[in-house]
């Protein structure tokens, strides 16, 4: 093929990829609106809108012309080294094309319409604390999740195709083994720590005016690197990050007037996700590379900023005086040390998103196990609340007093497939320590700079090694390139042990 | 054709119309977001998103299969009387199909992309008071407007196809004649009134906390019939109403801390539009009937609520004590009579949206004349600010001190074609009085009920005679059915004379 023809084909390919990117961005705008501003009366029509768009996007993703263009540019190897952007675009686009081909268009549109309805009913069910209201929807979600998996009959486990959607390349069996190892070390450690006198978090549980809380959070995330010209912060029932383009990446948070930690760590967490997306090479906009690579890697960034940085003494050495200045009557007499202990309070609790660093993964492992049981047919939807409560009793020693604080708490099963998302949170925790260890090795001055409010060295390392690449490399490749080794739990356990021994056992 | 086959074809047609409706709703969501929440960095990608969707919607609107289905159901007349919903859906869908067919898909996508860019640049140009910044965009908009008109070579005047988009059936020549008549009566009347001592509006120009202003407006529009479960109110630079579905109809407004009238009348105005859309027969959702029929009729509803009702003594007999209770330090010592005079202050001014009832139409007629001159090639974009300023001097005796308060003030030319929109405002003013006169004839108790805060009789008459029909009847048909006569300026001039003689000449 001549250079001119190849160039033309390449332009046609880019145009098709851009259309897919734009349609997915539009779906994201509709989703953002649905969760932040849409009045209840808009739900039914929103479902239809998402369904039409989902179908159109799927048609574009599976168009034979796209397949032909991918073949054509792929068969001209001279300029395509693995690391080149062009080769990477073709590689990732082709993988997505082959995957999309397996799923019928009718399925996608049924799924979108179902999910929009389910999401609305979940909000009502959660409000009225009535799992029964949303259970029929959830049964259909489970059927649809199984149907999705059935499009990939070559899979080892029914959950694998679902996991592939968010953590490409990971298998249910690998994750089970990893979580098993982690749990074996974590459970006795949580026991050890929770036997110590708990730290006092009452300083956080005072009345903090809502708008002032939000204003402080905006100051914090701007300093971390969140660019408000290219993003916004809104309120939503369930905090999330969503990107529409390189220049429009939004986060949501939630505020409790009587608990300052809610907005602080939700916002820092979501900002961590957003900073990742804001750092992707802007030249990738309009291609499948302009995305965080996986749930695990994405979550490693939100958790790194939320926990390793956002709950560190260095971070608050810089921000605490500013926080005190905003809330003198609440915090004027609380020392940095006491505040640091308060935000690292460990306690077995019911709500995943409120959980501390140590117990958090136990929440995730419960959900992961329940998902597998549902998908494998070993657990029925009607028995889910009971199974949930039993596992909470066994693993965390607590029984939820109602479904709102139990099985209805998280949006995920009511907004997506059942299976394939929760594992990312714990993978992210594990990776966050691996990445931070590597960053420290390269730039040992990071903590000292943070004390002075300088986040540039950390941000620069993350951008260089993770953010800029978007989806160019697989998660496994990113981990290997950035840390020199593969996914491993040791750095994470080491980090937890050091921090929490210091906090709880060296007093 | 057998009944079964016809039924099936009818279902296929409804599905296709629903898809078009949903895609247009999605475009509306993107537009709403663009004008309320989108960060500046999102503008470029938003243009691409709108362009892709505009192209897809246009493809759906011009699909040959749609034309065939319309032919098929249309050729089976037995059940299709003119007044039936089915016949009306087919009639309106066919008209839109034939119109869309004339416009090339490539044109639509170029237009959307251009407009998104122009809109963003307009905001910057307005901010920095620099017409030159947006002039090149506006030249292209003019070219595109002419190109659009050229798709309808059978038109009498270049502006007719543009006017048809919003006021179907009206012609540039008819409007010129109508505006000429109106102007002949209005100009001497404005002279007469403005020679009287102006009413004192200083009570409105005090410091009113922004949030409290918005809260009051929400109370007012809820009472008028705005349903917050099916809509929302947000802030935007330029107030507008936009509907996504029967259950999701949104308005925006703007607030000035130092001028209470800004938010009051902007909000009531937009709520008037929204109440119209909320009152359309919900069974029409997903069809081309689920839309206000024309700019003129739409504007008649916003102006009826804003002016005839919202600036009436009856309205404020009910609401003014509530307003005083919210703002005791500002209004405690201002009588209802003084407040009524303040909100009906007449003064020649520069900003259309701030103009009083009497001078308002002069602003519109200026824009309409300038549009025609631009389209006819008698005026160049580069000369537009000067032409604008000259006309303001001639017609209103004022020269804008800068372009922000001049040619950059309105969003319209920077968000749509040039031509075909402004006439609707004055048509709306004329119609508002015609409709209200008819409503009073049918229910003479309307004003007395409004004094008691009961808007039901008025709302019911409007819903019965206008709202419910959506686009089932043409504007001309609606006017004829509701008032028993065709468009006429007498009721409007009579209303203005009676009100303003009373206010200014009987003191």
Image: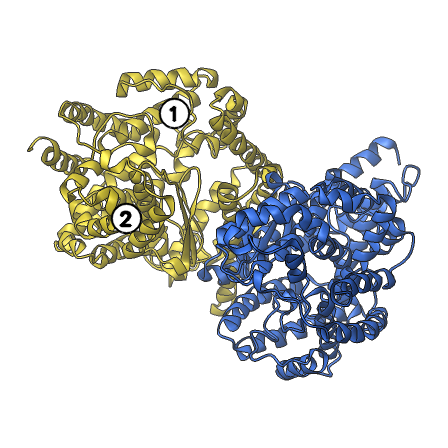
Chain colours: A yellow, B blue
Where residue A269 appears, x then y in whole percent?
32, 44
Classify residue B438 as left or right of residue B305.
right
Are the numbered discs 2 and 1 placed on the same chain, yes or no? yes
Residue B117 figure quarter: bottom right
Q: For mark 1, what is the residue? A: A405
Q: Residue at x 19, y 40 (%)?
A: A339
**Residue B467 in view (yes/no):** no
User: Where A469 falls versus A301 (above or below)?
Assistant: below
Crowdedness near tag 1: few (<14), some (14–19) or many (≥20) residues, C-alpha within 10 Å: some
Chain letter for mark 2: A
Res B12 visible: yes
Q: Is residue B398 left or right of residue A37?
A: right
Q: Which numbered circle lies on residue B111?
A: none
Q: Residue at x 27, y 30 (%)?
A: A361
> Where is residue B368 shown, x and y percent of the image?
74, 72
Element assignment for label 1: loop
In space, the residues marked 2 and 1 are separated at their CA atoms by 36 Å
x then y, percent, for residue B396: 69, 78
Which is nearer the N-term, disc 2 or disc 1?
1
Q: Is residue A91 left or right of residue B72?
A: left
Give the class, few, some or many, for how many residues have Cα within 10 Å of label 2's Cα (few <14, many ≥20).
many
Residue A172 x %, y %: 34, 29
> Which residue has dot 2 on it?
A478
| Mark 2: secondary structure | helix
């Amino acid at each position: 093929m001549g250079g001119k023809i190849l160039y033309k084909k390449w332009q046609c390919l880019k145009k098709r990829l851009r259309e897919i990117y734009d349609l997915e961005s539009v779906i994201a705008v509709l989703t953002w609106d649905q969760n932040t501003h849409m009045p209840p009366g808009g739900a039914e029509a929103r479902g239809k809108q998402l369904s039409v768009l989902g179908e159109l996007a799927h048609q574009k993703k599976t168009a034979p012309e796209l397949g032909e263009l991918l073949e054509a540019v792929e068969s001209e190897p001279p300029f395509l080294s693995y690391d080149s952007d062009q080769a990477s675009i073709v590689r990732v686009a082709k993988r997505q094309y082959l995957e999309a081909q397996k799923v019928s268009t009718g399925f996608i549109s049924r799924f979108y319409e179902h999910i929009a309805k389910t999401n609305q009913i979940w909000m009502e069910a959660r409000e009225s604390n009535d799992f029964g209201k949303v259970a029929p929807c959830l049964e259909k979600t489970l059927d649809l999740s199984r149907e999705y998996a059935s499009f990939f009959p070559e899979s080892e486990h029914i959950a694998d195709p679902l996991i592939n959607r968010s953590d490409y390349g990971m298998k249910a069996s690998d994750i089970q083994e990893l979580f098993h190892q982690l749990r074996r070390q974590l459970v006795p450690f949580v026991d050890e720590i929770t036997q110590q006198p708990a730290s006092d978090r009452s300083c956080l549980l005072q009345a903090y005016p809502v708008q002032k809380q939000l204003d402080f959070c905006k100051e914090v995330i701007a300093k971390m690197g969140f660019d408000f010209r290219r993003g916004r912060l809104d309120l939503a029932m369930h905090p999330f990050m969503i990107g529409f383009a390189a220049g429009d990446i939004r986060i949501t948070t939630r505020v409790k007037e009587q608990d300052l930690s809610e907005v602080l760590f939700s916002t820092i967490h979501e900002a961590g996700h957003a900073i990742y997306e804001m750092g992707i090479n802007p030249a990738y906009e309009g291609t499948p590379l302009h995305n965080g690579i996986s749930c695990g890697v994405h979550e490693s960034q939100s958790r790194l900023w939320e926990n390793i940085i956002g709950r560190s003494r260095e971070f608050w050495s810089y921000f605490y005086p500013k926080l005190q200045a905003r809330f003198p009557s609440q915090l004027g007499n609380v020392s940095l040390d006491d505040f640091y202990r308060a935000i690292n309070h460990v306690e077995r609790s019911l709500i995943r998103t409120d959980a501390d660093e140590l117990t958090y993964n136990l929440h995730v492992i419960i959900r992961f196990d329940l998902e597998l049981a549902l998908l494998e047919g070993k657990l029925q939807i009607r028995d889910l609340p009971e199974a949930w409560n039993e596992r909470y009793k066994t693993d965390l020693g607590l029984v939820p007093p109602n479904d709102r604080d139990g099985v209805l708490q998280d949006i995920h099963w009511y907004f997506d497939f059942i299976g394939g998302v929760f594992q990312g949170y714990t993978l992210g925790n594990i990776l966050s320590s691996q990445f931070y260890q590597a960053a420290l090795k390269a730039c040992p001055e990071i903590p000292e700079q943070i004390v002075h409010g300088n986040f540039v060295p950390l941000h620069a390392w993350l951008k260089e090694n993770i953010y800029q690449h978007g989806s160019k490399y697989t998660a496994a490749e990113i981990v290997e390139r950035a840390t020199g080794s593969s996914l491993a739990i040791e750095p994470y356990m080491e980090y937890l042990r050091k921090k929490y021994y210091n906090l709880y056992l060296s007093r």
